[in-house]
Structures are given as structure tokens and as C-alpha cells.
Amino acid sequence: MLDTTSLRKNLKIIIDGDPWIVVDCQFVKPGKGQAFTRTRLKNLVSGQTMDKTYKSGEKIGEQARIDECNMVFLYEQGGSYTFMDNNTYEQVELSAAQVGDALNFMTENMNVEVDFYNGMPIAITLPNFVELEIIETEPAVRGDTVSGATKPARLSTGYSVNVPLFITSGEAIVVDTRTGEYVERVKK
Amino acid sequence: MKPAAPQRPACFSNRVLALIELRDSILDAIRAFFRANGYCEVTTPLLVHCPGLDRHVEALPAGNGQFLATSPELHMKRLVCRGAPRIFQISPAFRADEQGAQHTREFLMLEWYRTGSGYREMMQETEELLRHVTGCCSLMPAGLSFPVPRITVDQLYERSAGWQPTRHWDEDRYFRDWAATVEPYLQTQPALIVHDFPAALAALSRISTENVRICERFELFLNGLEICNAYSELTDPDEHRVRFDQAARCRAAMGRPPYEADEPFLQAVASGMPACAGNALGLDRLIMALTGASHISDVHLFPEDLQPSP
């Protein structure tokens, strides 16, 4: 049984028989009072979220045994996302809610990790860094050399990131999927 | 003739240098404020025999039966007992097991004591300090205005949790509601002074003479961030002994090793402690509030050193 000292973002635990992932956790300690950890949890099967506050030292649940499998994202159809095991060619489907924020950075033929709980696909994890094409951004203004200045750019997935001024439409960039931030330009 | 002081660069370009300048200007403004108000700056030991009596604060052992100070409170009060009328201190404080967006195990604390005053005067002075520092450093958080609105703990809980803690004391419910609804409400308020805490949470504050269920204690919150904790200080020697005993029993009940009572402190109080008010203010958090930082490591010069080694 895990207690609050194990709580951290992305921890997967079993509560009342269901697998949950910690999407946010905050240490709270009122003056002259006991410490708490305030968490937001997401049910890995239903996608439902709940807020739960734990007293420091309280038991939180068993660590979830999650099997991970490398798969490739094939296509989306009617809000359902199909992935294929590279070795067995077995295919599985996940809902948009299960794919979650990964939708912002996932393109067809991308290699991802699919999490299985009791043989059921429940969530995916993207590589930390992915290459994505920019489909729309304002052209750089000549002479604008302020270092660190950025502009918004729309990715082929529809997601918008801030990029340095020298980046142009049609270029590919590397994005950190954990933070959603620009990392570097892909060298041609 | 003294050589001219080298001029400070007007504007730093990188984060660390900007933070050095910011922290320096805030500390400078704080020292100027206290000097102008007749305070002396003091330094008290960081290695202590008794780390205090807050049962929810764990001290870091420092060897030889000593601990790293969790706050300079007890030593500064000994100076007050010896006749120091107005003192302040800026010093590191250490607390085990506290780590998060608003907590670090080592942090910088501003603590001050003024004799002949109670917590009402201390509220006033805290606002003046805040006004002075925001003015000197040209840092005015959005929505902050003076005077800072005030609310009692009962009013606060009535509106965010639907009950009055000083009328129906329930410690477990109090802190659960704090984490669940009260603190989220405080986060919607740019600035709020919360005062008149339940007597059970008096620590070393004086119980109100008008209502025995409340203690003369207040905390200042900026955007939900607890900035300081202040009291009309308890001065009665017998009541001090009672509170130390209570704290020791609570620690024992929680299965934690007891801290020995601070005899030099208790003797100092027994020799006569003048009426006074004291305040302890977390400087890293104040800097967070003034700059809008969301994580305490954002205002640290060495954020990479804050995490304990695995």
C-alpha cells in the first residue's frame, strides 16, 4: 500500500479497484496545522476526474500494474484512435478522452507507448520529443533581432506553440510533449 | 577618504542576475523600513536545543542533540525578555518534510517583535511594511490595495465551508476544509488578513480577554499564499509551561520523539516578559507574491539545490 510520500504527477494507483493517474498534486500546509496533499486524479478507464485531499502519511492505494507496449498510431475514425503493435500487428482502439492531451502532438505513423491495465488499453504516452510540421506562422520581420522574442505557430495537429521569430511555415520543429514547448528547429 | 562605491549595473540581462538585484532591493527596503521605525537587527543561533513547540513542524537534527532552527522565535523572545524593545531578524529557517510549490526545507524568514503592542498594531505595521516594500521596489501585485481587507476565521469558514470553527471546534474537519475549500477561496483574493483563530491553534499567542474561544493571531494571505503569521504574544509564565506540556503530549500521541522544553526560554519568560507583538514572514513567499511566481523555486538563486537527494 502506498502512502502520500509516493504521490507525484503521473503516478498510477488503484483506488477501489479502478486504475487512476495523478494529473496534479500540491503540498498544502496551513500555518500551525497538519500537512496535506491535494490531488487531481483521472480514472484511466472512464476518463472521469476527481479531486482528493490526503492527510500526510495517509494510505492512497496500491500501485497500479500497468503493462506498456510500443505501438504505432495508424488513424483516427469517428473519434476513435487505432494503434498497431509493431510485432504482432494486433490493433487496438482508444477514445479521444483516453488519448487525452497527446492529441496535441500525435500524427499518423508516430511510435507511441500504449498502457494496458488487465489487458485493456487505457492510455498512451508519447515520446518526450516529437517532430512536427508548422502549417501557419507569421513571416519573420527583417531587422527584428530581439533575442528571446517569440511568435505563435500552428502545428499540423492544430495545436499552437510559441516559436522563435526565424521559424517559417512549412518547417519542422521539435516539441517537448511533456511541457508542450518548442525545443529546436529540425535540421534539413 | 573612502573610495567611491562601484556603481551597480542598472539592468541585468539574465535571470539569476535579475533575481540577485530583486532580492537585494527587497531586503534593502525591509531593513530601511525597520531602521526608520526604531528596530535593531539581531542574529540568533541556527543550532538550537529546542526547535519550538509546533506539533506539525518537524525539525532537522543537527547532531549533538541539537536541531537546525525552525524559526528564531524562542531566542528572539529571550532578547525581548532582557529588555530589547524592538528587534528584527532576517535568517534561514529549516523544516523537514516540507517540499512543494510553496515550501522548501530551507527558507528565508523575516521575524520581528515590538513591545507595548498587540496584534492590531502589528496588522497595521505589516500593511505599512508591505506598502513600503511594494513602493520601493515598484512591484505592485494586481489587485493589491490598502488598507488590506480583514476577515475573521469564523467569517472565512462560514462563507467557504458553512460552519464556525471557534463555536464548534473540530481540528480534523478544520484542516480538511482548509485544504478543500478555504485555501481555494483565499486564492481568489489578492490580499486578505485572516484573524482571530480558534484558541486550540494559539501556539504561543494570547487568548483574547473578550472571547476565550479565540486567540489574538493573524495571517496575511496574498493570492492565497500565506505570507506571515503574527500574534499578541503570550507573556504568562505558567501558561507557557502548560502549552509546552500540551505540545509534548501531542507529539508523543503522534508517535514522534519529544522535544525537551526550552528551559532558558521558560526562565526568561518567568523573569518577566513585556506585552509585545511578534510576526514571522516568509521572505521567499513574499518575493513570489510580488513577482507573481507560481513556484518557490522560481525566486531561488539555486533552484537545482532545493530537491533533497533521492
Image (cartoon, helix red, strand yellow):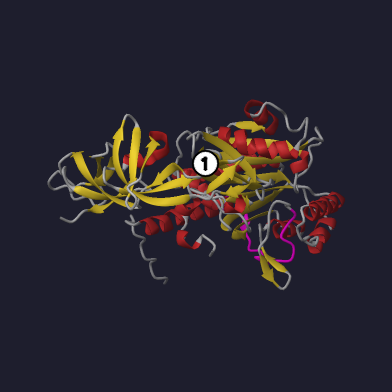
- Is residue B148 visible in the rendered image? The answer is no
| Labels in figure, total | 1
| Quadrant placement of the N terminus of chain B | bottom left
Residue at the spot of label 1 = B131
Magenta span covers which residues? B35-53
- The picture quadrant where one finds residue B9 is bottom left
Chain letter for mark 1, please. B
Mark 1 burial class by Cα count in 10 Å: few <14, some 14-19, many 20+: some
Magenta span includes B45: yes
- Is residue A162 visible in the rendered image? The answer is yes
Residue farthest along the left direction in this orientation:
A142
Q: Position of residue A112 (x, y in %)?
A: 35, 49
- The picture quadrant where one finds residue B229 is top right
**Foreground pick, A4 / B52:** A4
Residue at the image position 35 percent from the left and 45 percent from the top: A90
Magenta region, mostly helix, strand or loop? loop
Q: Position of residue A58 (x, y in %)?
A: 67, 47
Magenta span includes A87: no
- Secondary structure beneath label 1: helix
Q: Is residue A105 left or right of residue A133?
A: right
**Foreground pick, A137 / B293:** A137
Going by the numbered disc 1, the residue's amino acid type is Arg
Q: Is residue B240 left or right of residue A85?
A: right
**Foreground pick, B18 / B116:** B18
Q: Position of residue B264 (x, y in %)?
A: 80, 63
Q: Is residue B5 above or below residue B56?
A: below
Residue at the image position 38 percent from the left and 55 percent from the top: B18
Q: Position of residue B41 (x, y in %)?
A: 61, 59
Residue at the image position 49 percent from the left and 40 percent from the top: A44
Q: Is residue B113 above or below residue A95?
A: below
Q: Is residue A127 left or right of residue B246?
A: left
| Quadrant placement of the C terminus of chain B | bottom right
